Image (tube, rainbow, N blue to C red):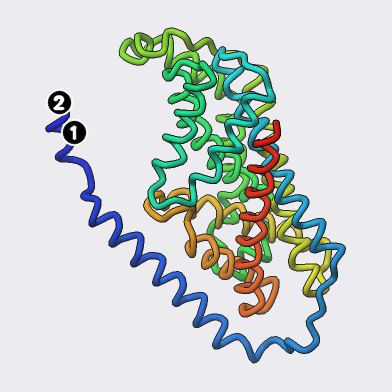
Amino acid sequence: MNREAGCFRIPRWLRTTAAVAVMLLCFFYLGRTLWLGARQVDWSELTVRPGPLILSAVLFTVATLIGGLCWSLLLEGLGQRQPLRANVKTHLRANVAKYLPGYAWQILGKAYLCRVQGLPMGPVGVGIGLEFITVILTGAWVALVTAPTAWLEALGAGTLIAWRWPLAVALGALLVGLPWCLSLVFERVEIIRRRTESIRIVARPLWWMLLWMLLAWLLLGLAVYGLIASLSMMHPGQWLAITSGWAASAILSLVVVFVPMGIGVKESALTFLLSPVVPTALAAVIAVLARVLTILGEALCFVIAQRL
């Protein structure tokens, strides 16, 4: 069985080569964008406004803390009721492992901390997978709902306009029906039911988890808006396009699992998606600064977790 499974595994050298190649291409795109677009921006007129910058940093940190709450609600939705403080601590401590080469470090770190916490590994494994899926699904829903028509046309994605709301409605229905879908799978699929006997689906915590995830996506969009507003005057209506662009770039970085935390991928995508809103060179600077604030927020949350 293991021998057969190994035939379908991607060799480690190939994954490493692909990750390095993607990162180099992304960094080349960012550098080229900065070089060619630098003349479009009068850098001498840029002044840092501390208020929006501080607000942005706070929102990045708050969104990370909300991730800990979502993890606790997810465990409760799988029938594993544990103290909120312990769950949040586990999530925030495991969160920093995602910057190590290889996506598995975050999974293994969280699984180990959950085992120390006394949680059964079956529900933990399901929870980690379900957390990854729901983050992508809620982010996709926010990206669809907040995308302005003019912004999509400016990006050359006008064909998506007709499908945007039907996709958002279908995705919203899937999210609302998620507890029933999980119950159906765990009850009807024999091989899954035998391995997840300790899981009991509870709908209300799962719905609350999804609502908090949606709020976190919106707050992250507001954080990026505040970051841009700290360097350039922005119309409040641009928040929708910025939020949609941030969600789409973050989802792309999550899907490219062989690149640690999508470093370079998220920044390149965000630069492109912000180009209708701000000059491309400034968009590249914003994308890099957003990564810096994200890391600082997660580091602060790790310190907070150590004191919980």
- Residue 74: quadrant of the picture: top right
**Rendering coords of residue 5 (x, y %):** 18, 33
How far is the residue under mark 2 from the one under mark 1? 6 Å
Type of residue at label 1?
Answer: Ala
Vertical side of 22 occupied by 221: above or below: above
Could you say which quadrant of the image residue 112 lies in? top left
Q: Which residue is farthest left?
A: 3
Query: Which residue sits furthest front?
Result: 307
Q: Which mark is residue 184?
A: none
Residue plotted at (50% across, 82% down): 32
13 to the left or right of 304? left
The answer to whether residue 29 is left or right of residue 15 is right
The residue drawn where x is 54% and y is 80% is: 33
- Do callouts 2 and 1 mark residues in contact (Cβ within 8 Å)? yes
Q: Position of residue 282 (x, y in %)?
A: 66, 77
Residue placed most toward the observer, 158 or 187: 187
User: In the current view of this chain or complex, which residue is farthest to the right?
Assistant: 51
Name the residue that disc number 2 marks.
1
Pick the front one: 194 or 102: 102
- At horizontal 63% and vertical 62% (from top left) the residue drawn is 292
In the image, residue 39 above or below residue 89:
below
- Disc 2 on helix, strand or loop? loop
Residue with the mark numbered 1 = 5
The image position of residue 260, as x and y in percent, is 44, 53
Q: Amino acid at mark 2?
A: Met
